[in-house]
Every structure is written in C-alpha cells, then in structure tokens.
C-alpha cells in the first residue's frame, strides 16, 4: 500500500517553479489511477516524490507503512517501478540488454536462472521475444515502448508509475499503450499510477482519476464522477463540453460556442 | 558476434607480436632470441615489452574512459579530451615539474614516494576537479543541443590549457609544456606509471552494468535502485586516473577516447558488461597499428605517434561522421 501524507515541495527546474502543497493521497490498489491537470499542476512531481526520485521538503510517503526514505533504494526499486516518458535514448543497447537492466534491483547485474526466466516472461508477455537481439534505435515507436514496458515487467514490482507515457506517441500507439496498461492491472494485478495529458484517455482507461491544480489535489474519484463540468472546468480553467458515448464520457475541449 | 571477437583477437595478437618485433635494434629477432642472445633479450624486456604494454594499456584505458564520459554526459561526442580532463592533467603535471623535484623520490617521514607517483597523483587530482566542475556545469545548464556540450568542453579545456601556458611562460617552461603535449611511446621519464591504468580498468569490468545504466539518465538509474551520483563520481575518478596515468607516461593521444568508443559501439553495442573487453581490444588494435606505422615510415627513426593517430583517427572519424549523417537522414525520412 502506498500512502502519501501531507507532502510539500517547491523547487525550480528549467525556469519553472515546481510545487506540491500539502498533498495527501492513498493509491488505490490494483487499479489504473490517472493524474490529470494543467501543465505545472505538480503531477510529475507527485509521481517522482511517490517513488522517492524527487526529495520532499515535508510530509512522508509510506510504502507498506514504512517511510520510503528509510528504505534502501534497491529495496524501493523492487516495489516501485517508475518510468519517465519514453525518450530518445542515445546509447546503443539491445532489447534484451534493456529488459535485463530491469532485473538489476534483484541481482545487481549478475543474472541468475530466475532472472533470465523473468526476462523471458516479460519479453513473451509483451510479444517482443523475436526482437530481443535488435538494438533499440532499430525499432519503431510502438516496439520501443513495448520494450520499456517489458523492462518494467522484468523489474517485477507491484507498483508501476508512468510519467506521461503517451508523449511523442501517435494515436495508434497511445491506444495500444493504454490497453497494455489496463491489461497489466486485470491480468497481472499491478497497481498503476499514470500521468496523462488527455482526459479522454483517463476517462476511457482509468479506474480512478486524481485532478490536480497548482500543487494541490482538487478532487479524486471514479471516472463518472470526475468527468464532469463541475470538476474539470476549475481544474483546467477551461469550459468543457461533456457528452456520453456508449456509456463512456467524452470531453470536447475546443470552443464549441464559436 | 563470436566471429567478430575471433577476428579482433587474431588481429590483436598479430599486432602485439609485430609491435614487439619491430624496432631500430636489428639484432633483436626470433633467431637471436632463440639463441639466447643477451642483448636481444635485454632489448626485449626493457624496451619492446614495456612499450607494447604501454600502447595496449593507454589505448584500452582511453577507449574505456571515453565511453564512460559519453555515458555520464549522455553525449556521443564527449571524451576525456573534450571535457577538460586531459588539459587539467597537463596542468597538474606542469605544476609538479615546476614546484616538485622531478627525478628523486619524495620522502615524508619514513614514507618514500617515487616522483612519478607524485606527478600522476597531482595530474589525477587536477583532472578530477576539472571534470567534476564540468559535469556540474552541464547538469546545471540542462543543455539539450548535442553539439553544445563538446563545444563547451573544448572551450573549457582551452581555458585550462591557457592557464598552463601562462604559468609555463612565467616559469620559462614553455618548451617543457610543448614536450608534454606530444605523445610518444618512446618517452623518457616515468613510463611505468602506465601500469596504474589497470586499476581503473578492473573497476570498470566490475561496475560495467552500472555505467551502462547511468547512460540512460538519472531518473532511469534511480528507478533501478542505482545511486546515480555515486556511480558518476566513481566514473569521473576512473576517467581522471586513466587520463592522468596516460598523460604522465605517454602524453595526449588525440581522438582515441572519442573515435574508438563510437566505432566500437556501432559494432558491439553499448552494454559495457558484454563489450568492455572488445572495446579495449579495439582501441589497442587501432593504436598498435598507428604506432607500428609511425615506426616504419621513416625507419630506423620514428615519427611521433600523435601524428599518425591524429591523421588516421581524424580521417576515420570524419568518414564515420559523414556516413552517420547520411544514414541518419535515411532513418529520418523512413519514420516521417
């Protein structure tokens, strides 16, 4: 279980002030939780703080009841996998190398049989076993993204945090990615927190939505409660138009009055 | 993969033998060695073997140092030579020559430290401080443009070199500084310092996976429970020690730390754990070849090895860059 208790943070990164203001949150188990909000709302900072990559100024994050800062980093890495947006990487490694890196917290770089088995399982689950000897720069965007998820799976953590996984992906790969995310919850019982920019992806694939603004959590709840004018308009400072489509809510965010 | 390794090993062994057998002392050959000729064996043990060992170690060291620098800065155009390490090592060595006795051991109490060790230590400390400052600068600036980092590094190195020149000028040691800056495997002085390179190389073999992981970025490393800052610091120590030991014993070998990692990774990939031995061999083969060339061209005299390394390495790197650019264009048009 992950509980965030009254964390605050403020720092400057790349000319922008990043803040979290007394944020508390209990991550719902075995669900996809989507963090939504405008740029600078603190979504990524919260995710970073929850996985102990970003240091907080006050408050604490409890992982199974223990302050995450008091746990060895290699132990945290066995519980929480944190993947930043899948970026262009300059180093030349194969899919197999990348997925083997996922076993690092467990074996420290010297792979045993169990580690090799986990690597094979992760590759098979993501259906990229035949690509294992290819270099990452030889893959398509969708294949590369599968490779990174396979690495996270090999890391074998109950919690998976994804920071803007849909950035730089076109629509086809974005949908594919969110389907995979949902499958990880239903088939492998993972608990996933994901930062999303597109509210419609949150509406369609998340089981829980957390709306953030100016470093605070405005509201949280099930998608049908969250995808409403009352919640979204103040979160994004924008007038939304919500329609029902096959039982899912869809937001129209362009100016429909003109 | 296995074939690449076999071919490279055969080349390596062949060049090592050639490097040992070629030289100005014509009476050293297989026949005289087998006959147990005292002079031949003397040349073998005191001239040829140390020289070949120095070539292999300095080339392997600079190749590995370059790859680690590229992982730390996440930039393929970085090397110990473009991050201030080499220039700072030169400054350290210059100060050691000016202010400390150069050929006698220094005694502190009962401890006797050979002058070569003191010089290497000073060069190491300067290189380490310079690279730490440089890495702090590039991390602070968060530069996205790939070319700015090596440009900044070259300017930074140029500034350190200018300070060295100023100090050398003040102490009338310009000639000495110029002599440092020409690499030679026939250098007099503290040649044995090159064996220090084995220490950082052993560290690299043990920490190979960690260095590959930090090449994927701080957040990526932290996610896997790797202490990013500690590994970067260890990496900078390794780079500095290699740069210092090579500089003190051989001198600056231009391009080696830049081109060898780049060429080796296109063949073997960047997973250091798998490729570190191949990388070292690749570097050694290149420098052995350059050295043999520089000994044969005006035989029985020899050319400065920096000259052949610069000419050959520069040409190879230019071809590599141009080919990389055109293949990069192909890749871009494919994804578009």
Image (spheres, coloured by chain):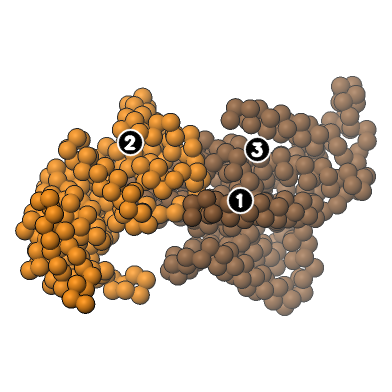
Chain colours: A orange, B brown
Query: Label 2 belongs to which residue?
Result: A126
- Foreground pick, B135 / B195: B135
Q: Is residue A227 visible?
A: yes
The residues bearing labels 3 and 1 have C-alpha atoms spaced at a distance of 27 Å
Q: Position of residue B55 (x, y in %)?
A: 72, 43
Residue labelled with disc 1: B327
Mark 3: few, some, or many residues within 10 Å (few <14, many ≥20)? many
Q: Assess whether mark 2 and mark 3 are in contact (beta carbons under 8 angstroms).
A: no
Query: Which of A184 and A151 lies nearest the eye of the viewer?
Result: A184
Q: Is residue A117 above or below residue A48?
A: above
Determine the secondary structure under disc 1. helix
Residue that label 3 marks: B281
Image location (x, y in percent) of residue B211: 47, 46
Q: How far is disc 2 from disc 1 in space, using C-alphas?
A: 29 Å
Label 2 Cα crowd, 10 Å radius (few <14 / some 14-19 / many 20+): some
Which mark, residue B285? Answer: none
At x 78%, y 46%, the residue is: B290
């Amino acid at each position: 279980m992950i509980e965030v208790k009254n964390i605050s943070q403020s720092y400057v990164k790349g000319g922008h002030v990043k803040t979290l203001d007394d944020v508390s949150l209990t991550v719902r188990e075995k669900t996809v939780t989507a963090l939504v909000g405008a740029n600078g709302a603190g979504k990524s900072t919260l995710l970073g703080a929850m996985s102990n990559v970003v240091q907080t100024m006050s408050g604490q994050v409890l992982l199974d009841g223990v302050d995450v800062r008091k746990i060895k980093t290699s132990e945290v890495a066995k519980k929480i996998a944190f993947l930043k947006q899948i970026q262009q990487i300059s180093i030349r490694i194969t899919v197999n190398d990348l997925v083997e890196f996922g076993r690092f917290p467990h074996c420290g770089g010297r792979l045993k049989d169990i580690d090799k088995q986990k690597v094979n399982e992760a590759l098979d689950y993501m259906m990229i076993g035949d690509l294992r000897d290819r270099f990452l720069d030889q893959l398509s965007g969708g294949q590369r993204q599968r490779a990174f998820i396979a690495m996270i799976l090999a890391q074998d953590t109950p919690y998976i945090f994804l920071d803007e996984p849909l950035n730089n992906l076109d629509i086809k790969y974005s949908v594919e990615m969110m389907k995979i995310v949902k499958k990880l919850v239903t088939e492998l019982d993972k608990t996933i927190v994901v930062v999303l920019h597109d509210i419609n992806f949150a509406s369609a694939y998340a089981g829980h939505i957390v709306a953030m603004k100016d470093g605070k959590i405005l509201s949280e709840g099930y998608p049908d409660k969250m995808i409403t004018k009352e919640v979204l308009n103040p979160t994004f400072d924008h007038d939304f138009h919500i329609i029902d489509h096959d039982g899912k809510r869809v937001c129209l965010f362009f100016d429909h009055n003109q | 993969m296995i074939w690449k390794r076999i071919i490279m090993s055969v080349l390596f062994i062949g060049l090592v033998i050639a490097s040992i057998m070629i030289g100005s002392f014509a009476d050293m050959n297989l026949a005289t060695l087998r006959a147990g000729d005292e002079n031949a064996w003397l040349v073998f043990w005191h001239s040829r073997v140390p020289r070949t060992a120095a070539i292999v170690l300095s080339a392997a060291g600079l190749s590995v140092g370059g790859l680690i620098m590229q992982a730390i800065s996440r930039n393929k155009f970085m090397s110990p030579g473009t991050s201030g390490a080499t220039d700072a090592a030169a400054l350290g060595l210059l100060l050691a020559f000016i202010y400390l006795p150069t050929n006698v051991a220094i005694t502190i109490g009962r401890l006797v430290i050979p002058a070569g060790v003191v010089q290497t230590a000073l060069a190491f400390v300067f290189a380490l401080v310079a690279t730490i400052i440089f890495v702090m600068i590039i991390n602070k600036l968060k530069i996205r443009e790939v070319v700015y980092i090596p440009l900044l590094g070259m300017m930074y190195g140029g500034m350190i070199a200018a300070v060295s020149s100023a100090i050398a000028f003040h102490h009338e040691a310009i000639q000495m500084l110029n002599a440092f800056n020409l690499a030679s495997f026939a250098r007099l002085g503290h040649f044995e310092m090159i064996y220090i390179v084995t220490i950082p190389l052993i560290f690299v073999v043990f920490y190979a996976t960690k260095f590959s992981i930090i090449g994927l970025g701080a957040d990526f490393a932290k996610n896997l429970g790797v202490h990013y800052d500690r590994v970067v610091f260890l990496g900078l120590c390794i780079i500095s020690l290699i740069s210092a030991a090579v500089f003190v014993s051989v001198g600056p070998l231009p391009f080696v730390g830049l081109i060898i990692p780049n060429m080796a990774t296109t063949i073997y990939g960047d997973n250091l754990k798998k490729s570190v031995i191949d990388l070292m061999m690749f570097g050694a083969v290149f420098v052995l070849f350059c050295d043999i060339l520089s000994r044969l061209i005006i035989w029985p005299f020899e050319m400065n090895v920096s000259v052949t390394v610069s000419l050959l390495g520069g040409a190879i790197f230019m071809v590599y860059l141009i080919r990389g650019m055109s293949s990069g264009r192909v890749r871009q048009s494919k994804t578009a």
